[in-house]
Amino acid sequence: MRGGLEPLAKALNALATGLNLTVRNVTTHTRTELSEQEAMERLAAYSYLARLLDQCETASADTEESDR
């Protein structure tokens, strides 16, 4: 997280993309049911992503200041 904003943003984006590609709607693509352990691990991965996103601060540039 200390590597700067751009690498952090790319890492969070990659984590979110990976989670969505590997976790989301898996039950529609397989016929086997998830074990409780697998389900908890997937939930934990999303929880970790949410925690990282909650720790982020958002800032926007003031349009008047950027025109100067």
Image (spheres, helix red, strand yellow):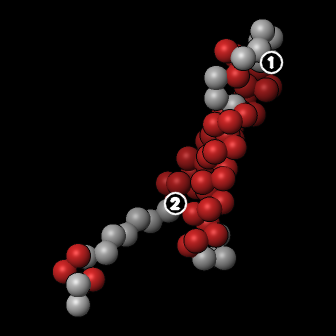
In which quadrant is the N terminus drawn? bottom right
Relative horizontal placement of residue 50, taking residue 59 as reference (left or right): right
Three-letter code for the amino acid on which mark 2 is drawn: Gln
Relative horizontal placement of residue 56, taking residue 3 as reference (left or right): left
Q: Residue at x 79, y 26 (%)?
A: 38
Asked which secondary structure carries label 1, the reply is loop
Residue 52 pos. (x, y %) = 58, 55
Mark 2: few, some, or many residues within 10 Å (few <14, many ≥20)?
Answer: few
In three-dimensional space, the C-alpha distance between marks 2 and 1, rounded to whole angstroms, equals 31 Å
Residue 48 seen in render: no
Q: Quadrant of residue 67?
A: bottom left
Q: Residue at x 60, y 76 (%)?
A: 4
Residue 26 pos. (x, y %) = 70, 22
Q: Residue at x 63, y 37 (%)?
A: 20
Residue 50 pos. (x, y %) = 56, 47
Three-letter code for the amino acid on which mark 1 is drawn: Ser
Outermost residue on the bottom side: it is: 68
Q: Quadrant of residue 47?
A: top right
Label annotation for residue 35: 1
CB within 8 Å, label 2 to label 1: no
Give the answer, above or below, for where 49 lies relative to 24: below
Q: Residue at x 41, y 65 (%)?
A: 58
What residue is disc 2 on?
A: 55
Q: Foreground residue, 24 or 37? A: 24
Asked which secondary structure carries label 2, the reply is helix
Q: Foreground residue, 57 or 14? A: 14
Q: Foreground residue, 53 or 61? A: 61
Q: Quadrant of residue 65?
A: bottom left
